[in-house]
Image (tube, helix red, strand yellow):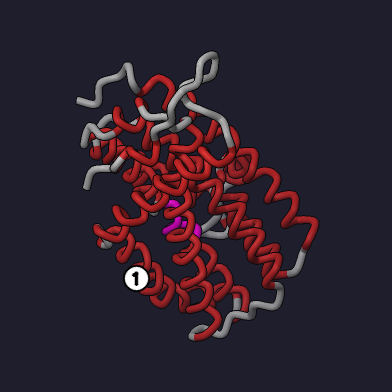
Amino acid sequence: MLLDTTALRTTAQPGTSPRGTSPRGTALRTTALVRHNTVLLLREPGPLASRMILPLVFVTLLRPLYTAAEGTAAGTVQAVTGTLVTFSLLALSIVGGAILTERLWHTWERLRSSAAHPLEILTGKALPVLGALLAQQVLVLGFGAAVLGMRLDHLPLLGLALLCWTLTLLGIGSALGVAARTHGELSAAYDIGGMLLSSLGGAFVPLAALPHWVRAVAPASPGYWGVSALHAALAGDVSRVLACGAVLLGFTLAAGLLAVRGLRRASSRSVL
């Protein structure tokens, strides 16, 4: 499906930027991009469906192992949050794929040559995927609460933690989608990176049970802060959630800047 760029065009006035900066123009262009990318996401539901279903299977299978080692309550929390972080990192494929597909279809040049600012393009890509990632995480947490008996006593804190974590995923996924040249490169990046970041972050195995060197480097992984934010939110620890959220937003900003920089250079780079 090709993007109709009519809504992305603006008529440049003498002495003004051809991209335009009026709030109304920005809203129209962003809305057109959001609508376009929502349609693309729903037309290919396979990757999204797999990221929704597989976490439920894994958490069901892994929970007995964690509860046997840590007790029912702590083991359930570890199983649910670890699975959520791991599979949301693997869902970077949805974020990056949305950008890379446009480039491989050679519709990326149409977007770059339109009036849309790189930030508007990223926003148009990000908002539909934001909804998909949040739906995935709410599904996993809802399954943990409804089926496994996990308590969700601090929903506002949990919502804040999920939002910060999802924004981090969007930033990283966008940077990967801009940097990758093929779907093979993107697949390797999110498979290897996702498993590495989640493992270092204590998603699979609690950090206390891992070697000292792993605990020392764990804070370099966004997964560590994602797991920590979720645990803190479930425990009602406001200060810890805010601290973890601030770090996650730092990762988001850094990845977003890399993505925007890559977008500015994309028009001069081949994707073949």
Looking at the magenta stretch, what is its main secondary structure? helix
Residue extending farthest to the top is 15
Out of 198 and 263, give the one closest to the viewer.
263
Name the residue carrying label 1: 53
Residue located at (42% from left, 59% from top): 87
Residue extending farthest to the right is 239
Out of 208 and 63, give the one closest to the viewer.
63
Crowd band around label 1 with a 10 angstrom C-alpha radius: few (<14), some (14–19), many (20+): few
Is residue 259 in view from this perspective? no
Where is residue 202, by image quadrant? Answer: bottom right
* The C terminus: image quadrant: top left
Where disc 1 sits, the SS reads helix
**Does the magenta portion include 51?**
no
Residue located at (43% from left, 53% from top): 129
Q: Give x and y (percent) for residue 125.
A: 42, 45
Is 90 positioned to the left or the right of 78 in the image? left
Residue extending farthest to the front is 14
Is 51 positioned to the left or the right of 204 in the image? left
Q: Give x and y (percent) for residue 71.
A: 60, 79
Q: Give x and y (percent) for residue 234.
A: 67, 70
Residue located at (57% from left, 59% from top): 206
- Highlighted range, magenta: 85-89
Give amino acid for label 1. Answer: Ile
Is residue 19 in view from this perspective? yes
Where is residue 10, by image quadrant? Answer: top left
Q: Give x and y (percent) for residue 68.
A: 52, 78
Where is residue 11, by image quadrant? Answer: top left
Residue located at (21% from left, 37% from top): 105
Name above or below for residue 42 compared with residue 267: below
Out of 44 and 8, give the one closest to the viewer.
8
**Does the magenta portion include 86?**
yes
